[in-house]
Image: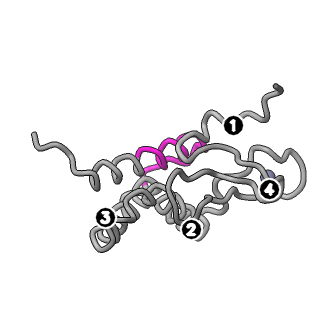
């Protein structure tokens, strides 16, 4: 087998991370998974045009899927930090950068790395 190129590795990783967050939110249904595949396909083209963006792919796929879900299903992922008030979605930060995280702008906190939402669920842990 040919070793995977850095581009393919990044795309595989992005797909796995976003799927993990979808599973954590209980929304990883077949049509939702196909949204992830669509985004990965588009971002493959995008990174081929701009190889320096390879580290940004996970954050971009997360945002693509978030936008696609908003049109079809509603807000995702819901903020697990704020217990009261209007339910609101988390945002990806940085929008265009490496090491993307889900953040709640309302509480001003980093909730989890993209791909680690499952570990952030279930409310806040007391420290
Ligand atoms: Zn919040």
Residue reaching furthest to the left: 1
Separation of disc 1 and disc 4 at Cα? 14 Å
Helix, strand or loop status at disc 3: helix
Residue plotted at (29% across, 70% down) = 45
Residue located 54% across and 63% down the image: 63
Binning the other alpha carbons within 10 Å of mark 2 as few (below 14), some (14 to 19) or many (20 upward) gives some
Q: What is the secondary structure assignment of the residue under circle 1?
A: loop
Q: Residue 118 appears at what percent x and percent y?
A: 60, 36
Task: Return the mark for residue 44.
Answer: 3
The Cα atoms of the two marked residues, 2 and 3, are separated by 18 Å
The residue tagged 4 is 87
Residue 42: x and y in percent read 35, 69
Q: CA distance from mark 2 to mark 4?
A: 17 Å
Q: Earlier in the sequence, mark 4 or mark 3?
A: 3
Q: Earlier in the sequence, mark 2 or mark 4?
A: 2
Where is mark 2, residue-wise? Answer: 67
Residue under circle 1? 121
Q: Nearer the viewer, mark 1 or mark 4?
A: 1
Segment tinted magenta in the rendering: 16-30
The question of residue 29 being in magenta is answered with yes
């Amino acid at each position: 087998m040919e070793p995977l190129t850095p581009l393919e590795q990044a795309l595989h990783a992005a797909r796995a991370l976003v799927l993990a967050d979808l599973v954590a939110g209980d929304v990883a249904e077949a049509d939702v998974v196909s949204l992830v595949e669509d985004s990965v396909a588009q971002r493959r083209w995008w990174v081929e045009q701009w190889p320096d963006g390879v580290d940004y792919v996970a954050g971009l796929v997360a945002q693509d899927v978030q936008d696609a879900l908003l049109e079809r299903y509603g807000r995702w992922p819901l903020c697990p930090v704020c217990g009261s008030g209007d339910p609101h979605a988390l945002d990806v930060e940085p929008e265009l950068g490496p090491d993307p995280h889900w953040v709640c702008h309302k509480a001003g906190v980093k909730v989890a790395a993209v791909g680690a939402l499952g570990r952030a669920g279930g409310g806040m842990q007391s420290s």
